[in-house]
Image (cartoon, rainbow, N blue to C red):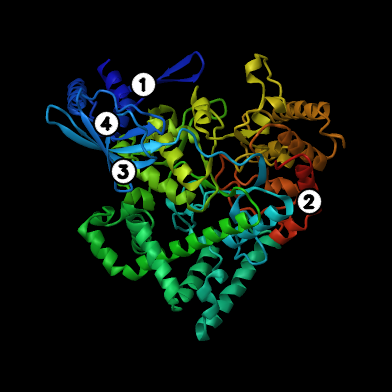
Amino acid sequence: MGRARLAELHGVATSYEPAPGRTVQVPEDTVVTVLAALGVDASTPRAVRDALEAHELAERGRLLPPTVVLRKSGKQPPPGLPEGTVLRVDTEDGRSLAWDGGEPLPLGTHVLRAQAPDGRSAGAPLIVAPQRLPAPPERGHGFLVQLYSLLSARSWGMGDLGDLAELAAWSGRAFGSDFVQVNPLHAAVPGRPTDPSPYRPSSRRFPDPVHLRVEEIPEFAYLTGPAREEAGLLLARAAALRDAVLRHGRHIDRDAVWDLKRRALELVRACPQTPGRRAAYCDFLAEAGQALDDHSTWCALAEVHGPDWRSWPGALKDPRSSRTARARGELLDRVDFHCWLAWLTDGQLAAAQRAAREAGMRIGLVHDLAVGVHPSGSDAWAQQDAFAAGMSVGAPPDAFNSLGQDWGLPPWRPDALAATGYAPFRELLRGLLRHAGALRIDHVMGLFRLWWVPQGLDPRRGTYVRYDAEAMLGVLALEAHRAGAAVIGEDLGTVEPGVREALAERGVLGTSVLWFERDYAGGARRPAPLEPERWRPGCLATSTTHDLPSTAARLTGDHVELRHRLGLLTRPLAVEQREDATGMAEWLALFGRLGLLPEGPADEESAVKAVHRFLLRTPARMVGIWLPDAVGDRRPQNLPGTWDQYPNWRLPVAGPDGRPLSLEELAASPRLHALMDEVIRSGGRR
């Protein structure tokens, strides 16, 4: 009982319910290991007693919690304060306010100070958040795209921020689109090869300069002499990379693209900046501060010692050591190079959002926040105190994966977040929302709890660790309010009861994928497709995501054949095909009853139109159109459960025949225009 009580105090689950009425006990050694990662010794009965006593003693002596989070309408002070305690609030704008809990406080991140009658005093970060997050303006539609897959006639072998700006400008003006949602643009861990997954980044705090459009850097136009000649050769090699992908069936090679861009950027950096550009760069450095200094130092050290800081020479593993400070000085030019890259990328992100808004988009760019970072990368090095050492985020066994999942991403420590006033989360959100009209949060259930897997253990032997959801949502609401941005939570898969309701109550939109929306509350053995009017309004409605089959592949059954060829099916092919066909027939029948399939079900392109007519019948605030769906692409961008068996994250957008299509060809595609005509007619924007 003592260990269970200790685990409960620290938010560590000793059991969980994978399904209603079924309870699974967490192994004792897992609980002990997870508590140890939180700095709590529970290895012996004596250690448990000591830890409980220490916790109770600390709580009795504590005047304020580590962080206080209030909603704007909240008027009550933190509970448990002795009678007669005097409170003051030092606001973020420099004021000092006497506060008795009777008046609402200004929104922001402040400091709460308490003076008790017995002489004790304390201070704690105080976050005052709005009740709800900003909502999207009316109903709107937009494209969902993996940016690397969107190559134009000017790309260097993969889609870039120039292509993103063009897509936004074109779709906003041509179709009245309100947004473009992209994959995470976070900085990747360099390597040979670099992990192409945008969901295992080195840093979530800074974008990857591989997305830069080099020719749009102002200094590029002023290259002269040998530098100009070398730049011309690099442009020719970039054109060959682009043509290899678009015309000769080669996969996107991120490392080859970066090799060319890095050399071109080094040439551009040697070109003097104008006084105004130099001043803007200095302003960026001052604003980004320690976070950028850390990230750029990691990048410079990785060039010398390799991309895994855990294998670096001893003192360099500590970002605050004197040895690291000396190394930073020795590598100052390379540190500045990576700071400069961050500035350039920030500027092109700003330009893309500006292009979107100038094209009439009411939201513009929707950025994507990955659930975590690579353990060898920049954030894990710079913020070691915030991450749980020896732990990885994953998922417990479920109906789709009986072995559970280990994603290889270290989780944030909830106690460390609270102790810092949630500074890592606040700074992360602020950076991502800097040039965004909305933010998608991958695995948004992680604001409530995450499945921690101790290093070396089977994912089935993990456990849930709980976060302070009120605090996490408060921080999210405050930063979204400051940016005027909506938030979309990816809430697919196993979701704890009450989570979707809590998110909706704060104004976080959910994600509704058509094929998963069935009448599970009806009690039928095989739930029927959910009629459009019964969908939740607060969601992004779509037909697929980057981890799921394209709509054309689902309609034709190609996705089942693909999984069969790769040995991913757990049942005979005929059984899988029969079940898949049955499910598809149910949806097509519903489309027919609603009059959404006048052309008949035999034509794949017409069925894709019917899918989107259906989505536009729902009350969803946002309707997302997977860009590859608009041209009949049958290949998934990522096939979970594969590594080298399938070219995950390396495929360009293509037509139904698998032939890659450039942005210019997409813009001229009759099939795409026919689908978007349907979207406009069906009320894609209100």
Up/down of 3 relative to 126, above or below: above
Which one is earlier in the sequence, the residue at label 4 or at label 3? 4
- Please name which of the two marks, 1 or 3, marks the residue nearer to the observer: 3
* Circle count: 4
Contact between labelled residues 3 and 4, with CB atoms less than 8 Å apart? no
Front residue of 233/544: it is 544
Which is more N-terminal, label 4 or label 1? Answer: 1
Residue bearing the label numbered 2? 673
Residue 37 spot, x, y in % from top left = 29, 35
Q: Earlier in the sequence, mark 2 or mark 4?
A: 4
Residue 679 percent across, percent down from the top left: 75, 43
Tell me which label, 1 or 3, sits earlier in the chain: 1
Mark 2 falls on what kind of element? helix
Q: Which of the two residues, 499 or 76, is positioned nearer the viewer here?
A: 76
- Residue at 20% across / 28% down in the picture? 85
**Residue 374 visible in the snapshot:** no
Characterize the local packing of mark 3: few (<14), some (14-19) or many (20 or more) Cα atoms within 10 angstroms.
some
Which of the two marks, 3 or 2, is nearer to us in this view? Answer: 3
Q: Position of residue 612 (x, y in %)?
A: 74, 38
Q: As drawn, is 132 to the left or to the right of 127?
A: right
Q: Amino acid at mark 1?
A: Thr
Residue at (44, 43) in percent of width and height: 479
Q: Which residue is mark 1?
A: 14
Residue drawn at (38%, 29%), measured in percent from left and top? Answer: 74
Left or right of 374 on screen, residue 156 = right
What is the distance, in whole Å, between disc 1 and disc 4 at their CAs?
25 Å
Q: Amino acid at mark 2?
A: His
Task: Give the labeled residue for mark 3.
Answer: 91
Secondary element under disc 3, as helix, strand or loop, is loop
The crowd level at tag 2 (other Cα within 10 Å; few <14, some 14-19, many 20+) is some
Q: Mark on residue 65?
A: 4
Question: Which mark lies nearer to you, 2 or 4?
Answer: 4
